[in-house]
Amino acid sequence: MDDNLDSSNPAHVAPISFSDPEESDRETRAETLRAQAARCRRLCSSVLDPRTRDSLTNMAEEYEAEAARLNAGD
């Protein structure tokens, strides 16, 4: 009997995953992008220079748009 299939020895049983690994990666990436967007927005609230604020706002919007694309499965 193959040790990897021996259910009497849990140390040798491979974990079963029902989620799509690619979907999980997209979700993780989308969460990371949303966190980056939130950081940009927090920084924006403490910056006085208008150009820097605009840059941070644009970056946040780009991160959020990419996160939305990932969530949509694109």
Image: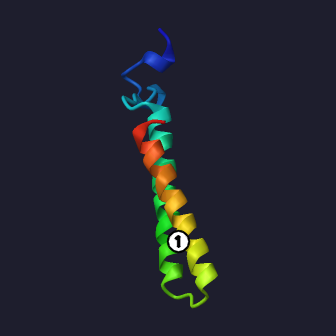
Residue 61 image point, x, y percent? 50, 62
Numbered disc 1: secondary structure: helix
Give the residue furthest to the bottom.
48
Residue at position x 37%, y 21% from top?
Answer: 7
Give the residue furthest to the top.
1
Residue at position x 50%, y 41% from top?
Answer: 25
Q: What's the image's color scheme?
A: rainbow
- Up/down of 72 relative to 60, above or below: above
Residue at position x 44%, y 26% from top?
Answer: 13
Residue 2 image point, x, y percent? 50, 12
**Structural crowding at the residue carrying mark 1, measured as other residues with C-alpha within 10 Å and reported as few (<14), some (14–19) or many (≥20):** many
- Up/down of 62 relative to 72, above or below: below
Residue 62 image point, x, y percent? 54, 58
Decide which of 28, 4 is in the foreground and name it.
28
Kind of residue at disc 1: Thr
According to the image, label 1 marks what residue? 57
